[in-house]
Amino acid sequence: MRSDLHYQVSLGQLLGEGMFGRTFLGMWRGGDVAVKTVRVGKESEASSFLREVASLAAIRHPNVMQFFGACLQPPEQCWLLCEYLPGGNLTQWLHGDRKQGQVRRSLEERVRMALGVAQGMQALEAAEPPILHRDLKPSNVFLDVSGRPCVADMGLARRLTPASAACLTGETGTYVYMAPEMIRHELYTSKADVFSWGVLLAEVLSQRPPYEGLYMTPVQVALAVGDNELRPTLPSDTPEPLLNVALACYNPEPENRPSFALIVHHMRKVSSAGLPYVTISSF
């Protein structure tokens, strides 16, 4: 971790604000970078910052935002330097913005996008030890100029070690994407991320926010999901192979959900089969 890194970076426009800090467009070594600035005033905030650094540094994959370096000089100069992805986030890609409105995406495009996210999550799953993202959602997936999706925002990520596996409980993340075992404050594993990806898949396929039209607050949604009374609704014309993989991700028993390796294997077959005329066997 470089103590002098902030002297080498010039900050530009504000790109966005999140739960843990603000992100700026920066210039470093002659190229554009995304600079996440985090104000660290407490030990718990420093621990969260260091966890994000460790998680990002452990992964090199085309579908995970590339990490370049970090600077920890509390409270102001706590920076993460990452790949600049100018294509916006997946929420914007799916739902548009106030200027352009929603752009209808082809099913092939949406499947490729969901596959790319799954590939990034597979890289986290395959790390040693595995990394739990714990807040997977479209606004935490960013796109490059070619539309390549990259999993980002590791502020809540944790490494799944034997010690952490025995104490990972409680609500972490965003209610409408959260796995039922997390909502119930039970022990959870990387299969909680699989559930979140399944919710993201439903949103990608429908191009609608999950649980839209139910007139429920996020807390009400979480309580119903935690009681296994509610799951995302998929479009009625969803091809059966995609429906099967989504339903597998929603399994109330985490150990019965597929791994990301299996999800990627299945989604690649779906993507290469020629939608919508897929004839792949059940998941």
Image (tube, helix red, strand yellow):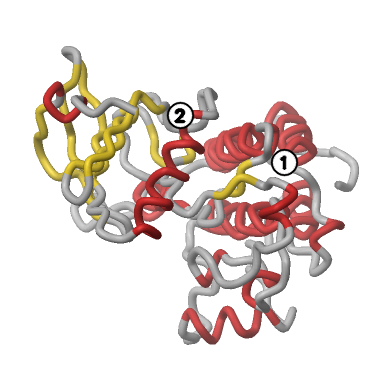
Decide: is 240 above or below 72.
below
Residue 149 visible at all: no
Dot 1 corresponds to which residue? Answer: 260
Kindly identify which numbered label has been placed on residue 148: 2
In the image: residue 49, left or right of residue 250: left
In depth, the one of 99 and 266 nearer the eye is 266
Decide: is 279 above or below 60.
below
The kind of residue tagged 2 is: Arg
In depth, the one of 184 and 162 nearer the eye is 162
In the image: residue 89, left or right of residue 222: left
Instruction: Report x, y in % for residue 216.
Output: 49, 86
Q: Residue furthest top?
A: 30
Crowd rating for badge 2 (residues with CA inside 10 Å; few <14, some 14–19, many 20+): some
Instruction: Report x, y in % for residue 134.
Output: 56, 56
Where residue 146 sits, quadrant-wise, is top left
Residue at 61% x, 42% y is 131
Quarter placement of the N terminus: top left
Residue at 53% x, 70% y is 176
| Element on which disc 2 rests | loop
Residue 28 visible at all: yes
Instruction: Report x, y in % for residue 63.
Output: 52, 30
Q: Residue furthest front?
A: 43
| Element on which disc 1 rests | helix
Where residue 231 sits, quadrant-wise, is bottom right
Decide: is 20 above or below 231.
above
In the image: residue 117, left or right of residue 208: right
Residue at 76% x, 50% y is 245
Q: Earlier in the sequence, mark 1 or mark 2?
A: 2
Where residue 33 sits, quadrant-wise, is top left
The kind of residue tagged 1 is: Phe
In the image: residue 66, left or right of residue 249: left
